[in-house]
Image (cartoon, grey):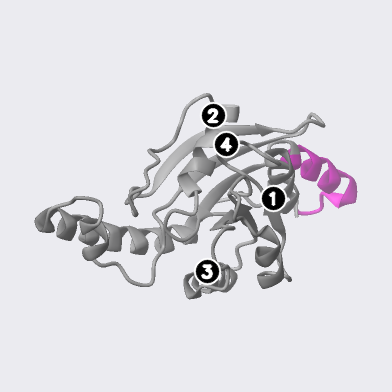
Amino acid sequence: MLARLVEPKQSGGFLSRIFSRLFRRRKRIILGIYGPVNSGKTTLANKICMDFVGEKLGTVSRVPHETRTVSVMENVSLKLRNGSSLVMDVVDTPGIAMRVTYRSFLRYGFKKEEALERAAEAAKGVVEAIKSMERVDVALIVLDSTKDPTSQVNWVIAGNLKARGIPYIVVANKIDLPYSRPNRVEKAFSEDLVVKISALRGDNIESLYEAIAEVASG
């Protein structure tokens, strides 16, 4: 978790300001990436890690619940155009769903036994994703902007983060697609910070990096 600055007794305002500045320079956070199934979480995690580490974090697939366990890339140094930087541990999480059924895997050619196993793993992944919120400092809620943003699962994710006091950014992803409607995401989450991007192409990704740094410093 993010370290907390403890002001030494009788240090005075001058020393406190020095320690605060030193602390900000070494700022480090755990960034959690959340969202419903196939919203582009792993694609975004891979984009962040490729931009600053040169390695991918996970495997992307059209099959739902491809990411079934929490994955972490440590020591990702996010660097902005203004020269500032932020060290992050990037946490990619399984897609969160209100209901997981083996039948959804049958459509992708899995046999029933394999589908049942996948569904069980996916259900455990949802629980693991929610539990991982306990250790993150800043979260991204990644939404597919071609879909209805008022889906119940989106409110569940946001509600869990709010209940834990975790600041988050709503990411309206897939703006490169013809049926993308990021303005609907902005309207649905009018009280939250919304950033429109294409994780696949990198459209407007610098704005997201700046938003992460701003939220982390707040």
Question: For the residue carrying disc 2, how many other residues have a C-alpha within 10 Å: few (<14), some (14-19), or many (20+)?
Answer: some
Q: CA distance from mark 1 to mark 3?
A: 22 Å
Q: CA distance from mark 3 to mark 4?
A: 22 Å
For label 3, the residue is 154
- Bounds of the magenta span? 6-24
CB-based contact (under 8 Å), mark 2 and mark 3:
no
**Residue 76 percent coordinates (x, y):** 56, 33
Which numbered mark, 1 or 3, is in the foreground of this view? 3
Looking at the image, tell me whether mark 3 or mark 4 is earlier in sequence order: 4
Q: Nearer the viewer, residue 184 or 65?
A: 184
For label 4, the residue is 48
For label 2, the residue is 50
Q: Which mark is residue 216?
A: 1
Q: Residue furthest right?
A: 14
In the rendered structure, which amino acid carries the disc numbered 3?
Answer: Asn
In the rendered structure, which amino acid carries the disc numbered 1?
Answer: Ala
Q: Going 12% across and 58% down the picture, which residue do you hit?
A: 112
Q: Residue furthest front?
A: 178
Question: For the residue carrying disc 3, how many other residues have a C-alpha within 10 Å: few (<14), some (14-19), or many (20+)?
Answer: many
Looking at the image, tell me whether mark 2 or mark 1 is earlier in sequence order: 2
